Image: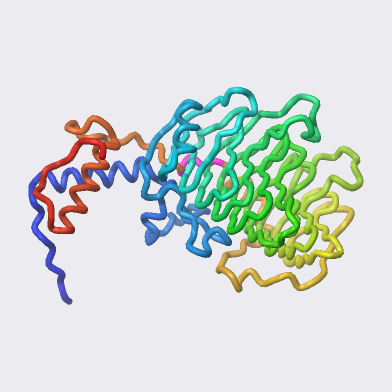
Amino acid sequence: MTHLHSKRLPGPGYGRVLAAVVGLVAALCLGAVGEARAGTPAPKESRWSDRPHGFASLAGGTTGGAGGKVVTVTDPVSLARYAAAPEPYVIRVSGAIAVEPFGSDIVVTSNKTIIGVGDTGEIVHGELHLNPGTHNVIIRNLTIRDSYVEGDWDGKTQDFDAIQMDTVDHVWIDHNRLTHMGDGLLDIRKDSQYITVSYNQFSNHNKALGIGWTTDVKTQITIDHNWFSGTKQRNPSADNCAYAHLYNNYLSAQVADGDPVWTYGNWSRGQTKMVIENSYYDGVQHPYQADATAELVQRGSILKGTSGRHDAWGTAFDPRDFYAYRLDPAAAVPALVTRYSGPQKRIGGTVEPHVPAEYPTVQAAVDAATYTVADHLAGTDGWAPHAQHR
């Protein structure tokens, strides 16, 4: 066996700082910057990865704020400031943040990860908004709730979505709980591309997940392991999507208001090519339907107590031509999705980090070690810890 000789460490403090930073990164970034440790497999009991899959993993992938500073926010001013910053950030949301005025937008710019700390992170009365041209954004492990305007069930008074994006690319929406908002829960609009929506809960709402509002046929989207419960329509509605891949989703407790048309499950609209696999529909009216101009392939799903339209025509596409994925059995979907969708305690990091005494902040320790490790590997260090922000 050949042994590689390592360089001598330059001083006794080096190992201690490096060890401290390893602990800090583990504490701060669990689930938020998993891209930096892509070679580490998820625990066997875990039902998710810290790297995006599906269409969000293609064409360069989606890394969010990886490589940027890690910050924790507990108030709306800090959240808005970091979310709109020009540089990358991993933004950890701790506790419930009430947005004012009611229904206001938090603008999210490119190269951001916004992630709830454990299952505590909430955005209340506000919307995460991605403007045209925004790219490389991860939104994970949050509850976004309660901007509903009383009496406006159709959402015609105010456009208070939970998350809205227009003509963006490379976005991963994962393990969120979106509920009781003023218009749509998740609107993926116009010519957005390379999107994955996974392990989310959509609940207590009229219009859950809308895709489209464009005459172009560009959007590529993966929608998997989501739970639609107590919703009425757009579960999703996909209009003019080039490729819409839906698998292992669970639709249950559909709103039953007697509407014969606009209460439905999945709708392939316009020129959309949609593939549905191994999903579970429980008591759903019009579980899946397609326009005459669209295509819809369905295989392996379970229909329990459904009624109305069950459309399937055309050849659509083969998702495996684009990426690999694992299908769970349709019979297992209700148990898996109800347990593992929505915010999880193990995502986002809940461990309180220990900061070495000579560093005033967590970020100072991370900066110092990053600087000294890089210098050491380059052979340019004089081994002098740097405790200041750079």
Q: Residue at x 58, y 23 (%)?
A: 100
The residue range painted magenta reads: 343-347
- Measured as percent of width and height from the top left, residue 336 is found at 61, 51
In the rendered image, the vertical position of residue 294 relative to residue 251, given as above or below: below
Q: Residue at x 57, y 55 (%)?
A: 169
Q: Is residue 154 left or right of residue 48?
A: right
- Give the colour scheme of this rendering: rainbow
- Quarter containing the N terminus: bottom left
- Is residue 346 a member of the stretch shown in magenta? yes
Residue 330 placement (x, y as % from top left)? 69, 60
In this view of the protein, which residue sits in the foreground, 40 or 290? Answer: 290
Task: State which quarter of the image contains the C terminus.
Answer: top left
**Left or right: 281 in relation to 323:** right
Nearest the viewer among 344 and 137 is 137
**Which residue is painted at 79% across and 55% down in the image?**
267
Picture residue at 80% right of the left edge, 26% below the top: 151
Front residue (pair 156, 225): 156
Please say if 138 is above or below 218: above
Vertical relation: 80 (above or below) 239 = above
Residue 130 screen position, x and y as percent: 58, 43
Q: What kind of secondary structure does the magenta stretch mostly adopt?
A: loop
Residue 250 locus on image (x, y percent): 70, 51
Q: Looking at the image, how many numbered discs can be counted on the residues?
A: 0
Relative side of 87 to 241, left or right: left
Q: Which of the 4 image quadrants contains residue 148? A: top right
Q: Which quadrant of the structure image shows residue 8?
A: bottom left
Residue 118 in sight in this render: no
Within the magenta stretch, is there residue 16?
no
Q: Is residue 125 visible?
A: yes
Residue furthest out toward the bottom: 1
